[in-house]
Amino acid sequence: MKKTAFVCRGARDANIPLVYQETPRKDRGDEFLVFFHPGKGDFESLARILFRNVISVSRLGQPLQYFTRVLGMFRNESGSGDIRTDFLSGSMILVMIRRGKNVYILRNRAVETIHWDSGPGIAGPVEKMTGAEELPLVKPEGQGELFEKPVEEFFSLHRFRMPSGTHTLVFVPSGEFAERYRETLLDSIFFPSFESGDDMELDIDRTIPGMHWSSTADGAGSPERFLGKIDAKWKWTAAVGASAALLAAIFLIFNPFGTTEPGLPMGRQVLLSVDEKTPEPEKDPQNTAADPGERIAAESAEAPQNISNTPAAAVPISVKLASEWKKKFNAPVTSSPAISGRNVVFGCRDGYIYSFGMDGTLKWKYAAGDGVGASPWIGNDWIIGADYKGNVFRLDARTGGRTWILGTGEKIISSPRADATMVIAGTTGGRIIAIDASDGRRLWTVVVGKSIWASPTLGEDYIIAAATDGSLSRLSRSGAVQWNSKQDGTIYSSPLVIQNENLVIFGSGDKSVRAVSLADGRLVWRTETGGDMRGSPAFDGTNIYIGSEDGILHALSLDGAKIWNAGIRGAIRSTPLIKDGLLYVTSYGSGLTVLRCADGTPVAEYRAESPVYSSPALDDGLLFFGTMQGFLHAVSISREAV
């Protein structure tokens, strides 16, 4: 490990930061980083003066002596009273020294430093790192400080020793900032796709720095190779006053989105992740060679299907999960795959819908108007898809040829639903749009809430739609609102309708699972979970299974009683797949976990190269899912009697 990789992403022209970095030529040299981001335009000149002074101070001797001198400059140059308070509270100030594996980080307390360990998939404040300690800052003497807050109280100084493995530190202005921009950060920073071109800007008003290091034995994840995969124009080694919008940072900032193991103290968190390998995209996905993945044997059952009424019981067989093949694309695959005949169909943020055979042969691809995050809906011989530009379209399942297309004018993230006569789609403008399935004519449009991310449900005589502002609505097939039930939390979870039980079940942003009456929308029960719920529920005929942001899979009875919960690797945003007493769950912990329905015991795991948003699909002994690094995985399932 010779140096770290420092990358940023943010607004191009507004609030330009001041950045300086020195990286050592040899292992024994110091790495030095200074990052200033003035909170107000009025403070830009003051920030520049202090920035230059911090860089010019000698770093000879102990790091503590250097930081003491830096604080003295802030005391003398930043003014007094309200001016000092506003500047030190509203700006992002970060000074880092790495000497060998010892790291010292001085930051104003408004800045949150979040550590991500890609090994176990754990994110949390830097204070929670093993061996991290906060060093006391000596307060100055003198009566002047009796009448105002001492400079030292605006800062914290932490020291830790760089652990082995692949890690990232990300610095955000506050937890409130991450929450306010959670959707922008999720969609654009976490393994971002570049379908928008080099001029893509984020809708955020700050620049966000991150630092990555890796000490793997073979160097595959080293910062040198991490940066080497990026064109020279994207690199930062030393920059002063540079704009950060043109940097290809591959990390996530999100709150609350923690991935953790059960029992770990987390506190307030922001999750970030880094692509440690940054593989080169292939020009033709059809030519991708099979790449064996990790093989883990465990007790399990035969290949799963989406829903099964098989009772949850232990099955005395051993199951092996192995990579059959995988394909690499130019953007994340967040769309959940669907099975059409003998083909697997899915969307990609590169702007295409793909169809592959079971052997990994590309059958066809359809060029949409923009990235495709929605999962396709499969009919008998046709496919319904939607893209980020707001187009809804029908394709021939055999050829990928388009039958019709309808532009809604609003971005579509949620997956469309259809039957023989009607297609419904939800938009980020909060609208449910009904479309004639045969010719693509718009039938009606109804606004149900602020924005729709959850996939709607299309029943025989009803439509259920959920919006991010907590609105849950039942519509008739003619578009009449039959009831609207406003929930306390946000809703990103796609509602599950159990019609014979008169229940609509979904996860809520208030850390609960809720069930309302299908007939009138009244709350039937609410079960607290301890974590925000963005995963969608699955039902095996007896129990309900749903995952949460804190990496916990919950099993509930039809009356909301807790049966068990199990911690897996990473936040769960997918829908579990159920078959013969087993659950197959994908997560942001970069993998697929298999658990028993009966008690939640994990029995097998398959590790992918990056976090997984899409839900798994199954056909002919193969499980399919996409990853944020732009892969489609085909995982074989084999079993043996024990």
Image (spheres, rainbow, N blue to C red):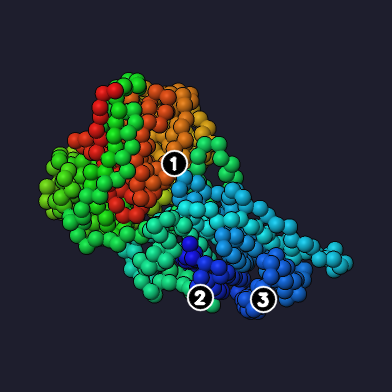
Q: In which quarter of the image is residue 287?
A: bottom left
> What residue do we see at 35% from left, 21% from top?
314
Q: Where is residue 415 in the image (x, y as percent from the top left)?
A: 31, 46
Q: What residue type is labelled 1?
A: Arg
Label placed on residue 569: 1
Task: Determine which residue is flagged by label 2.
Answer: 238
> What residue do we see at 56% from left, 60% from top?
101
Q: What residue type is labelled 2?
A: Ala
The answer for how far apart the CA atoms under marks 2 and 3 are is: 18 Å
Q: Is residue 570 above or below residue 461?
A: below
Instruction: Judge by depth and name the residue closer to the eye, 37 or 182.
Output: 37
Q: Position of residue 553 (x, y in %)?
A: 44, 34
Outermost residue on the right side: it is 143
Mark before the other along the chain sequence, 2 or 3: 3
Mark before the other along the chain sequence, 1 or 2: 2
Q: In this view, does 125 lie to the left or right of 295?
A: right
The answer for how far apart the CA atoms under marks 1 and 2 are is: 36 Å
- Whether the residues at callouts 3 and 1 have beta carbons within 8 Å, the answer is no
Task: Determine which residue is flagged by label 3.
Answer: 58
Split into 4 quadrants, where in the image is the C terminus? Answer: top left
